[in-house]
Image (tube, rainbow, N blue to C red):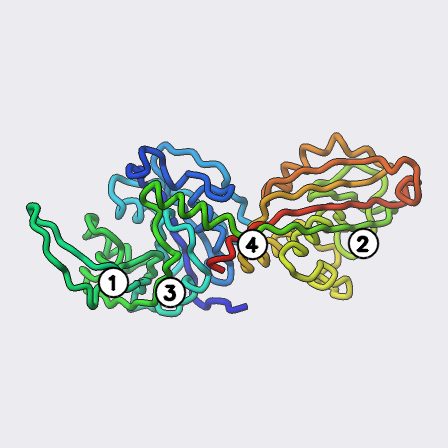
Amino acid sequence: MIVSEKSVSFVIVAGGSGMRMRGEMKQFMMLGGRPLWRWSYDVLTPENVKEAILVIPQGSKINHVPESLTVPLKIAYGGKERAESVMNGLKEAKCDYVMVHDAARPFLSVNLIRSLIDATDENHGAVPVLPVSDSLKKIDDDNISCVDRDGLYVTQTPQSFPREKLIDSLRDNLKVKDEAEAWMKKGHELRYVEGERLNFKVTWPEDMMISRALTEGITRTGTGYDIHRLVPERKLILGGIEIDSRLGLLGHSDADLLTHAVMDSILGAAGLPDIGNIFPASDEKFRDADSIELLREVMSMVSAEGWHVEFVDAVVQAQVPRLNAYRDAIIESMRRFFEFNVKFKSAEHIDDSGDGLSMSCWAASTLRRADIWH
């Protein structure tokens, strides 16, 4: 996996009113089970970006805010003009370099992010561009004339710059249409990389219709299973929650078998190896490991492969202890990552689980990928 040597903040600009979408704020409209802005966040990986800043309208409240699973997320509030919103986001950014992206472009790729990072240095910004493919006309006072499209390009986001120089550029140019305009007005040099046709901007209602058609994508289901022996003098941890019990689960890590089964189900749906291969018990660095932290790594892995976890369902089988009182806490713990449900079943005094000697768990995960742009 390629890791960027640059320290990069990623500003997602979602501060507009969305007037062309008939009054609805498009950045919060649902697309494939996620608000539009989440698509830009979910493609980020810690190998390329250190932090994300989401800029939203003043007075707005947002749902579906992920915990810092892969890239820490901050919230900033927008201004009257786009440049003001960007500036507010830049004030929250801490890295040497910054990328500014429209939340209304949900189909950003990791490859485009990497290309822009590589093209940016302390003296150069970088933008993605595409050649104009349509014939152009200019209408002035009802008079129509042709415009030569040769050498004309449309500019996309994200746009990438050294942070301090971009702040200085925008400070004197708050009426610009994009960051590159302010950058060049300040006399700085700009590079370009090839943009992506699928990185289009959702502006009109028809654009959302196209986006929803694209996000039907591919859905896959994976299953996971784990079993651990119950022993004295071990903590009992399920879904990251410590259970009050005289018996705990025996294992190389913290033996959180619920989280283990969930991880295997997610990895299975993504077509990746199981946790025994990724976090082997033969490796001492995983001794007493926090399984929730391992789950964070798994989430980063499947996200890098272009997968989004839609839903996870699990069943824990145990005779002892009684677990139903912990159900809400466990669900809340796991919902930091994805929508989640769990049931607890008695072993009905059958086999080791029924004798209180072991505990087992089954999990099923549904993952979605709009494979057309990955």
Residue drawn at point x = 25 percent, y = 39 percent:
80
- Name the element at disc 4: loop
- Quadrant for the N terminus, please: bottom right
The span from disc 2 to disc 4 (Cα, nearest Å) is 29 Å
Q: Nearer the viewer, mark 3 or mark 4?
A: 4
Residue farthest along the top direction in this orientation: 325
Residue 121 position within the rendered picture, expressed as x and y whole percent measured from the top left: 34, 69
Side of 332 relative to 15 (left or right): right
Q: Tell me, yes or no, if residue 287 can be seen here.
A: yes
The span from disc 4 to disc 1 (Cα, nearest Å) is 32 Å
- Name the element at disc 1: strand
- Name the element at disc 2: loop
Residue drawn at point x = 47 percent, y = 62 percent:
48
- Sort mark 1 into few (<14), some (14-19) or many (20+) by Cα contacts within 10 Å: few
Residue 289 position within the rendered picture, expressed as x and y whole percent measured from the top left: 71, 55
Q: Which mark is residue 116?
A: 3
Question: Disc 4 designates what residue?
Answer: 307
In the rendered image, which quarter is residue 320 located in? top right
